[in-house]
Image (cartoon, rainbow, N blue to C red):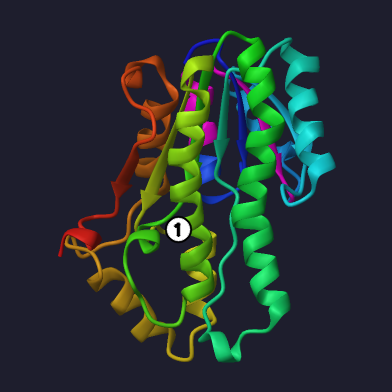
Amino acid sequence: MKDKVVIVTGGASGIGLATVERLGRDGARLVIADKTDPAPVAEKIRAAGGTAEAIAADISQEADCAAMVEAAKSAYGRLDVLINCAGVNARNRIEDAGLDEFEWIMDVNLRGTFLACRAAIPAIREAGGGAVVNVASELALMGVPNIAIYTASKGGIVSFTRALASDHVDDGIRVNCVCPGPVDTPLLRQGIVNAPDPAARERASVESTMMKRHGRPEEIANVIRFLASDEASFMTGSIVVADGGATAQ
């Protein structure tokens, strides 16, 4: 990944942050995009000897997605890789969920992935090809109670990835997707804290995996890094599950 120009959305926390840190060590030239100010993360990468720019961006907004691509081209003259880590979650049965909740989850997770890809792909094509890595969820592949909207948004990302791979294979752009299981991120912790019985929610989350533990963000970052790299040169349209065995049970 040395000298590859990479945009990472959701790069200020969780899996996105772990991905930024991994790619920074590998010598990638980074654009870190997040709704939460990503400047401190970029400063940390630079202090460690890496190369990084930060841009505050809400990926559900078309103009923000265009701006992050322009930031990459302005700083580095090209774009090689887009990694879509940004996402939100909420748990509810659908009769208890308002339309605003549905739209919020879909706007960030599915619309945001669409907008980021639409903005980035022409720039990646101009650079001679590259890679897109989308982040979905193991919940895109299984039925779990009280989380139908999130599941639908992530299922959309899985299908979108396969179709996009077909559209852009002749452009030399590989498009793949990672489906993490329960990973110990701020998003997962927020869901546990907000549960009626946090201890029970955490036990259920851990027990959902074959390994009986939560994943670590850096474990998913390793998978993302592989798919983004030339080492995955024969992979496109792939859905890679990294879930501690949750979907294999």
Q: What residue sits 56% from the left and 74% below the top?
A: 90
Q: Nearer the viewer, residue 203 or 174?
A: 174
Q: Residue furthest right?
A: 63
Q: Nearer the viewer, residue 33 or 161?
A: 161
Q: Position of residue 22 (x, y in %)?
A: 46, 30
The quadrant holding residue 87 is bottom right
Residue 223 coordinates in the image, percent (x, y): 35, 36
Closer to us: 145 or 199: 145
Magenta part of the chain: 19-35
Q: Amino acid at mark 1?
A: Gly
Residue 39 in sight here: yes
Where residue 174 appears, as percent x and y from the top left, is 45, 24
Q: Secondary structure at mark 1?
A: helix
Q: Which residue is mark 1?
A: 155
Quadrant housing the C terminus? bottom left
- Horizontally, residue 189 falls left or right of residue 105, namely left
x%, y% of residue 195?
Answer: 49, 84
Q: Residue at x 40, y 60 (%)?
A: 140
Tell which of 150 and 48 is nearer to you. 150
Q: Residue at x 76, y 49 (%)?
A: 58
Is 32 a magenta residue? yes
Q: How many numbered discs sit on the rendered protein?
A: 1
79 w.r.t. 61: above or below: above
